[in-house]
Image (spheres, rainbow, N blue to C red):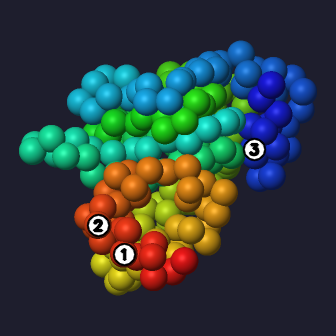
Amino acid sequence: MYNLLRKNIERKIPLTDEEWDIIVSKAELIKLKKNQFLQIQNSNNSYEGFILKGSFKTYILNENGTETVIFFSFENEWMCDLESFYHQKPTTYNIKAIEDSEIVVINKMQKAYLFAVIPKLIKFHVLMIERANVAIQQRLLDVLNKTSKQRYLDFKERYPQKVSSINNKNLSSYLGVSHEFLSKIKRTVS
């Protein structure tokens, strides 16, 4: 059932069957229906997760009640509220399934145990954190330096199979534009 996860890890480090069994014993499979939450903003429930199936949006709910989508996450990707997970602070973000989804999660205590028992997982962890930092920097640079149209085209190119399944409300929030402006962008690139 977790084959996608094992392949993801083994692209960076080899695992024995015994090591894999230990990892699986500490992981939890969570199945969420569309619009169910994995994490709620300002809670004390944070996971590191690997998406086996489905899609998620990571967003904040502003004081005026509007959503600002920070990231989308899809199959075969890792997802985590980094500050909350690693520093045991209340969660910064809401993480919600935007389609029926399955995610393998682990909490910080379980991860620390795995590091102690399978030390080579630390190397994998470092590579994951490096990748997360690069993604965060790229997102920031895109917001600061690219037009909304360029960001839309980049997203469409990176996730061609997903762009049509994300509703305009979520996509316009992610791009930082109004629904009307997103419609104009879509009309000009069609």
Q: Mark 2 — residue?
A: 180
- Tag 1: amino acid: Lys
Whether tag 1 and tag 2 are in contact, CB under 8 A, the answer is yes
Q: How crowded is mark 3: few (under 14 residues within 10 Å), some or many (20 or more)?
A: some
Vertical comparison of 150 with 152: above or below: below
Q: Residue at x 27, y 52 (%)?
A: 68
> Which one is closest to the eye, mark 3 or mark 2?
2
- Going from N to C along the chain, the mark reached first, 3 or 1, is 3
Could you say which is closer to the camera, residue 103 or residue 168?
168
Q: Give the CA separation, mark 3 to mark 2.
A: 41 Å
Real-space Cα separation, disc 3 to disc 1, in angstroms? 41 Å
Q: Residues within 10 Å of mark 2 (few under 14, many from 20)?
A: few
Q: Quadrant of the C terminus?
A: bottom right
Q: In this view, does 59 lie to the left or right of 4?
A: left
Q: Can residue 124 be seen in this view?
A: yes
Amino acid found under the numbered disc labelled 2:
Glu
Callout 1 secondary element: helix
Q: Residue 90 occupies which quadrant of the picture?
A: top left
> Does 56 sit above or below residue 180?
above
Query: Mark 1 sits on what residue?
Result: 184
For this view, does 27 lie left or right of residue 33? right
Q: Is residue 49 above or below residue 180?
A: above
Residue at (36, 75) in percent of width and height: 184
Q: Is residue 81 above or below residue 188?
A: above
x then y, percent, for residue 66:
19, 46
Q: What residue type is labelled 3?
A: Ile
For label 3, the residue is 9
Which corner quadrant holds the N terminus? top right
At 45% from the left and 82% from the top, the residue drawn is 188
Q: Where is residue 146 in the image (x, y as percent from the top left)?
A: 38, 82
Q: Distance between the residues labelled 1 and 2?
A: 6 Å
